[in-house]
Each structure stands twice: as C-alpha cells, then as structure tokens.
Image (spheres, rainbow, N blue to C red):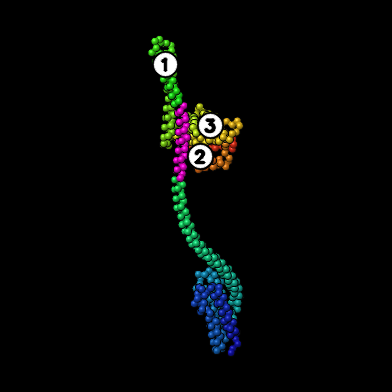
Amino acid sequence: MSSSPDYIQLLVLAPVAKVVVRQLSRFLDLPTRLARWERVLGYIWVPAVALFALTALLNITSQQVSGGYWLFVLGTVAAVLVAVRAYRPARTLLLALGPFLLYKLVEFVLEDATGRLPKRFDDVMDSTQGFVLICLVTFIFIARSQKKTLEKERLLREEEERAKRLIEAQNVELERLVAERTAALTHQAEELRGALTDLKTTQNQLIQSEKMASLGELTAGIAHEIQNPLNFVNNFAEVSAELVTELEEERAGATRDPGLEAELLADLKQNLVKISQHGGRAASIVRGMLEHSRQSAGERVPTDLNQLADEYLRLAYHGLRAKDKTFNATLQPDFAPDLPPVEVVGPDLGRVLLNLLTNAFYAVRQRQQRGEAGYVPTVGLRTRRVGEQVEIRVSDNGTGMPAAVQAKIFQPFFTTKPTGEGTGLGLSLSYDIVTKGHGGTLLVESREGEGTEFFISLPT
C-alpha cells in the first residue's frame, strides 16, 4: 500500500469531517430542523473511506483527491446552512463559510498535482488565507453569541408559556370560585332583599308610630291651649247672663235707676267684647290645628318663622304639661324683629320645631326630677338672620349629652329614651326635613350635665 501524504490526509479528514458534521448538527439542532439531512450527514465519512480505498487500490498519489473531498465536505455544510437559513445563526455561519469555501475552491484550482501553488500566487493566497480565517473565526463567535441569545429568548418564551398556562389554570379556578361566590352572594342578596322588605315594613310602622306620637303631643298641646280661651268664654258668658238677669229685674221694678242700668249695660258690653276676643283666639287655634293636621303638599311658601316658632313653643310646652300638671319651665323666646319671610314647608318645619322643643322639655324635666337644689328648667327659642341664612336655635339647660351620643343623634332608630318612650326616628326625620327638604343644616352642641342647643340654618 502506498504511504503518500494523500492517504494520510484522507484518514485524517474522515474523522474531522465526522466531528464537523456532528458539531454542526448539534449547533443547528438538525434532528429537529432537518431530520433526514441529519441521518444522511452521519455518513459523511463514507466518501473519504471510499477515496482512501480507491487511491490505495489504484496507487493514486494526487494531492487533489483529499482537496476535492474537503471541498465536498464544505459544500455539504454550505448546503445544510442554506437549507436552514431561516435560523439566524445558520445565516451567520453561511457568511463565515462563504469566503473560506471560495478560498478553498481557488486553492484547489491553482494547486498542481503535488499540492503546491505557483510562486506568483503565494503572497496573495497567504494574505487571503489569513483574512478568510479571521473572518471565519469571527463569524463563528458571532453565531455562537446569536445562538446563546436565541436560546435565552427560547427559554424566556417557554417560561412565559408556562406562566401563561399557569395563569390560565388559575383563571379557570378563579372563574369557578367566582361562580360559586356569585351564587352564594345571589342567595345572600335574596335573603337581604327579604330582610330589607321586612325592615322597610317595620320602619314604616315605626315612622307611623312616631307621627302618631307627635300628633298626640300636638293634640294635647292644642287641647291645653284652647282650654284657656274656652274657660274665659264660659266665665264671661255666665257673668253676662247674670248681668242680663239683674238688668231685667231692675227694669221690672217700680223705681228704675238709669245709672245702674247704664253700668250694667257697660259691663255687659265689656263682657261681650271679652267673649268675642277669646272666641277669636279659640277659632285661631282651631284653624292652626287644621292647618298643621293637613297633609303637606311639599310646596314652599313665604312663612313668618317667628310666628311659627312661637306657636310650636307653646304647643310643645302645653303638650308636656297636659301629661304632667306639676311640670313648669321658664320659656325664653327671643325672636329677631327684622326677620324676613322664608320660603319653607310650614307643616314640615313645624314638625321639626315640635320635635326639638319636645326633646328640650323632656331633658329639663328629667333633670328637674333629680331634685337638684336651685335648678330652674329653662327652654330657649331664638331666631336670627346670619348673612344669607336664617338661624333658629333651640336650647335647654337639661341633662345634656356625651360626645359619643352626639355623634349618633341623627342616626335612624337611635334614642337615649327608655324603651317605649321613643322610636329614635324623630331627630332623623327632622334632619332629613331640614337638609334634604329645605337645603339647610341641622347641628347640635351639648355639654353633659349642662344642656343642649340645636342649630337650624335655612337659606333665605
């Protein structure tokens, strides 16, 4: 067997080609991208073995045999790179391999049978070889960097895909939980709806009870108020009847005294005037009672707040005295004389004043029952004009309220009275009438053990 360099080169090139193809397959992931090519490339060493056998058999010593095989390997690698050119590192390797393959092709063409180049091409080929090798190495490193980057991107995409699948699974679970929770909330909502209906029914009953209680207090106050003029009417009518009888007797006598008759007629006339005055007063009270018992239409009309406040002050006071004849209190009305008429719903604002005044009298009565020495129950009602507002103040020197109670005083159903004496809706309704019905404000200031003052502020 010949021992020429061609034999040795073929023996060396076969495993080198095998290693190159294996590294290329691993680098480009050919089993996934080009499964058929990967299987064919596994036999890249076969042509080298065949050429080795042929040169050995025919005793061929041409250096171009090994060069031709090497060009075959490089061409095969180039074909693979072209096939997977969609992969960015493959395109980079193709750029690296192009100059090197072209250099090898030119070298193969220029070499003689002994593998030598003509002397005139030595310098050019040496310079070109250096440039080609640098270009090859550089682009290989670039391709490796690109592969690492793409690998990181692939891992990141896989991680995102896993996260997406996890989120989708969690979403499915959340949807299931939301569906269960929605069903539970729907059931609770139905129960709450039923409870709300029952609560509204109870609230309406309590409001009606509160209205009836206020009506009872109003009726008691009116009854006490109207009793005075009726007593005067009855008394003066009785005296007038006696005067008429006495006058008839005088005129029927044998001797008549004109002076006495004139005096009796004067007294009778004066009594009739008194009867007329107190009858008018009783009629006025009845008219007021009819006005306040009328259902409110919600229409605002110009109203004299001083007169309204004075009427309800007396009604509230006599309403409590109708329940407790022993109760007495000092009333301190203080009405601004220059107060202009204010557009309000009179019956509604009257209910507010009656509620506040009734609470004030209740507070001073409670303190009076403690038996404090020198204590004089006092309730004040004051009107003032403050800028563009009209202010009504209801004050008392009763039991007062702690801060915790003041914070809840306008809440529905909150009451400090014992069970059965209050529904806790009076101040809540009053607050709504003032704030929502009239666009005003209702505030409270209180000092425990000293007294309470409510402030009503209404726009003029």
Give the numbered dot on residue 448: none
The residue depicted at 45 percent of the width and 28 percent of the height is 226
In the image, 297 versus 242, the foreground residue is: 242
- Extreme-front residue of the structure: 254
For numbered disc 2, what is the local secondary structure?
A: loop
- Extreme-left residue of the structure: 252
**Is residue 209 found inside the magenta-colored segment of the image?**
yes
Amino acid on which disc 3 is placed: Phe
Q: Earlier in the sequence, mark 3 or mark 2?
A: 3
In the image, 427 versus 85, the foreground residue is: 427
The residue under label 1 is 246
The location of residue 359, given as percent across then percent down, is 52, 36
Q: Earlier in the sequence, mark 2 or mark 1?
A: 1
For numbered disc 1, what is the local secondary structure?
A: helix
> Is there a contact, CB below 8 Å, between mark 2 and mark 1?
no
Is 419 placed above or below 309 here? below
Q: Earlier in the sequence, mark 3 or mark 1?
A: 1
For numbered disc 3, what is the local secondary structure?
A: loop
**Is residue 372 found inside the magenta-colored segment of the image?**
no
The residue depicted at 42 percent of the width and 27 percent of the height is 283
The span from disc 3 to disc 2 (Cα, nearest Å) is 18 Å
How packed mark 1 is, by other alpha carbons closer than 10 Å (few <14, some 14-19, many 20 or more), is some
Residues shaded magenta? 202-228
Camera-nearest label, 3 or 1:
1
The residue under label 3 is 327
